[in-house]
Amino acid sequence: MQIKAESKFIRTSPRKIRLVADLVRNMNPDQAILTLTYLRKRAATPLLKTIKQAIANAVNNHNLAKDSLLIQSIEVNQGPTYKRWRPVSRGRAHSILKRTSHIKIILKAIKEKKVKKVKKLTKKKK
């Protein structure tokens, strides 16, 4: 079973996020979270949030155990580029490109452990 999570329009260039994504590829999500928590790169934060989102999707929507998950793939694609300009000498302008990213994470279940949700019983008053 594949579980997907996406984050779009992140204001960091895809190249910088790919450097961080290469560190946590093929890890289990717990190791990836621990690695990204202590990594001193700004690109680690959106990647960490997306991994946590994918885990929450697996646990809440598909009733899978957190231990049985593995990161299958991490894709970092380029989003739209904001175009700005900066005035320079002699009445000219230099362009500034502010790049954005889209992150897509796919988790897979190693073992199909389903977690049973237990309903709380309430005592009825007579």
Image: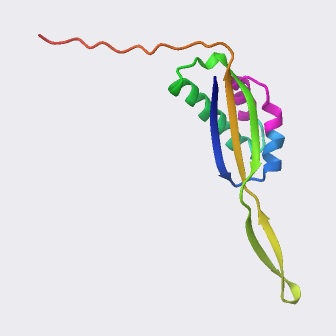
Above or below, 98 relative to 42: below
Considering every residue shown, the one lying at the far left of the view is 126
Q: Does 90 appear in magenta? A: no
Q: Give the residue displayed 19% in from the left and 12% down from the top.
A: 124
For the point 66% across and 34% down, the residue is: 51
Give the residue displayed 74% in from the left and 72% down from the top: 84
Residue 25 pos. (x, y %): 79, 30
Q: Is residue 124 above or below residue 39?
A: above
| Residue at x 65%, y 38% (from the top left corner) | 50
Q: Residue 39: image x %, image y %? A: 77, 37
Left or right of 84, for residue 19: right
Q: Quadrant of the C terminus?
A: top left
The overriding secondary structure of the stretch rendered in magenta is helix
Write down the quadrant of residue 106 in the picture: top right
Q: How many badges with numbers are in the image?
A: 0
Q: Nearer the viewer, residue 114 or 99?
A: 114
Q: Quadrant of the N terminus?
A: top right
Residue 104: percent from left, percent from top: 69, 40
Relative vertical location of residue 50 with respect to residue 15 in this rendering, above or below:
above
Q: Which of the 4 image quarters holds residue 69?
A: top right
Q: Can residue 22 be found in the magenta stretch? A: yes
In the image: residue 16, left or right of residue 123: right
Q: Residue furthest right?
A: 90
Name above or below for residue 80 compared with residue 53. Answer: below
Q: How is the image coloured?
A: rainbow
The quarter holding residue 23 reads top right
Q: Residue furthest front?
A: 1
Q: Position of residue 78 (x, y in %)?
A: 76, 52
Bounds of the magenta span? Answer: 21-38
